Image (tube, grey):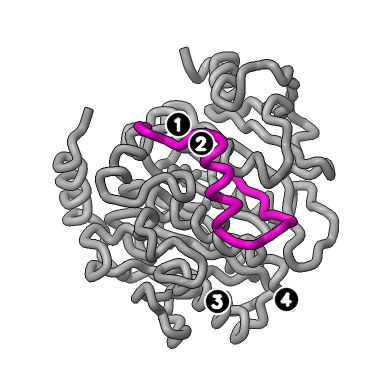
């Protein structure tokens, strides 16, 4: 078991060898002033030269020891945006707020609606929507690690803002409030019960739905933020979406498994995507043209960037959801061509469903 000091030392080492804050190929520019900025964050943005008439927007939150430009360089989001005419907004943490440039996903004053870093990101979104005529019904958020946990914070505290989100190697909302608790949760220790997870999500705002669709990504070999965190995020969101935990569709891909749940309206509301053997990082597909290998950017032949954009309807080829107004989730994954099995409700909960699926795919012993 790694100690807290060991983990901090490894983060510091990786930060020391990380890519320059602004790679020469970066397409990002400063967003400019965006409100009171109580979380004292910075904001970068990429606006393609050819925008759709009412473009969508993706908010992308980098991980620890990264910058917005480094994540942009590795993830492929800006290239995809250039091809399909949507905007990408990159909040950026500062070393003044966090020495390892982690978003403060566990600090109470930064994760409550109307406060701290969460409010700063909300203000960035408002500014970008105003100046770039963003379609408010097509705003999405994603992030890695601390950025993934912060993406979950945004989905929890401002659910009416987002049509969907993708949490990569992240943690449940409200599962920690101190540094020691944060490290314990990363190791899978002391994660809240199902009832507490779902209660904390509901209490994060006064929203009464519809709720954003969510995908949860995790490598089965992640020893930094262990996979039980991804399972807990799925559990956290099952309540508000009204899904039956035992009624899951399972798609076996090459090196990955996608488990999905539909809400009572028959729309895919939650996806859990497990990447076989992958450690801590964002899954990318270099050969597919979206992403570059780098620290925490892991070429596994399956792009979380492209899959998320397709699921959200920002790019073609996946079946799209019905037209929506603000607050109605949009973008769904079509599994019509996949081999699907239906576990029985008494299968033993989300963790057993996931483990059984991974075993049947040969991804877990």
To which quarter of the image does residue 80 belong? bottom right
- The magenta-colored residue range is 188-216
Q: Earlier in the sequence, mark 4 or mark 1?
A: 4
**Relative to 238, 290 lies left or right:** left
The residue that mark 2 highlights is 232
Q: Quadrant of the N terminus?
A: top left
Tell me if I can see residue 130 in this picture: yes
Q: Earlier in the sequence, mark 2 or mark 4?
A: 4
Question: Which of the labelled discs sits on residue 228, or is there none?
Answer: 1
Viewer-nearest of discs 3 and 4: 4
Q: Residue at x 35, y 46 (%)?
A: 296
Evaluate if marks 2 and 1 touch, with contact meaning CB atoms under 8 Å apart: yes
Q: Earlier in the sequence, mark 3 or mark 4?
A: 3
To which quarter of the image does residue 125 belong? bottom right
Mark pair 4, 1: CA separation: 38 Å
Mark pair 2, 1: CA separation: 6 Å
Question: Which of the labelled discs sits on residue 54, or is there none?
Answer: 4
Mark pair 2, 3: CA separation: 35 Å
- Residue 322: percent from the left, percent from the top? 85, 55
The residue that mark 3 highlights is 47
Task: In the rendered view, tell whether residue 87 sits above or below residue 229.
Answer: below
Q: Residue at x 35, y 39 (%)?
A: 186
Evaluate if marks 4 and 1 touch, with contact meaning CB atoms under 8 Å apart: no
| Element carrying mark 4 | loop
């Amino acid at each position: 078991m790694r100690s807290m000091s060991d983990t901090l030392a490894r983060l510091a080492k990786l930060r020391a060898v990380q890519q320059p804050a602004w790679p020469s190929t970066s397409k990002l520019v400063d967003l400019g002033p965006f409100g009171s900025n109580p979380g004292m964050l910075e904001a970068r943005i990429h606006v393609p030269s050819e925008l759709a008439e009412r473009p969508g927007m993706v908010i992308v939150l980098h991980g620890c020891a990264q910058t917005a430009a480094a994540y942009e360089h590795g993830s492929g989001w800006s290239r995809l945006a250039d091809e399909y005419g949507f905007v990408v907004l990159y909040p950026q943490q500062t070393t003044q707020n966090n020495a390892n440039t982690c978003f403060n996903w566990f600090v109470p004053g930064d994760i409550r609606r109307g406060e701290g870093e969460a409010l700063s990101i909300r203000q960035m979104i408002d500014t970008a929507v105003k100046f770039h005529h963003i379609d408010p019904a097509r705003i999405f958020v994603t992030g890695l690690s601390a950025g993934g946990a912060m993406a979950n914070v945004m989905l929890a505290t401002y659910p009416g803002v987002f049509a969907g989100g993708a949490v990569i190697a992240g943690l449940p909302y409200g599962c920690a409030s101190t540094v020691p608790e944060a490290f314990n949760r990363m190791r899978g220790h002391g994660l809240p019960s199902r009832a507490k997870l779902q209660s904390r999500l509901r209490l994060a705002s006064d929203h009464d739905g519809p709720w954003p669709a969510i995908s949860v990504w995790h490598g089965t070999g992640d020893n930094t933020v262990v996979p039980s965190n991804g399972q807990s995020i799925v559990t956290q969101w099952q309540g508000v979406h009204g899904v039956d935990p035992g009624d899951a569709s399972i798609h076996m891909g090459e090196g990955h498994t996608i488990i999905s749940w539909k809400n009572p309206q028959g729309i895919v509301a939650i996806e859990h995507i497990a990447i076989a053997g992958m450690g801590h990082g964002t899954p990318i597909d270099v050969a597919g043209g979206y992403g570059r290998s780098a620290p925490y950017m892991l070429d596994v032949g399956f792009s979380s960037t492209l899959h998320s954009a397709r699921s959200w309807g920002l790019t073609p080829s996946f079946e799209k959801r019905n037209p929506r107004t603000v607050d109605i989730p949009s973008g769904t994954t079509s599994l019509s061509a996949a081999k699907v099995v239906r576990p029985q409700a008494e299968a033993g909960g989300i963790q057993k469903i996931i483990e059984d699926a991974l075993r049947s795919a040969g991804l877990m012993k």
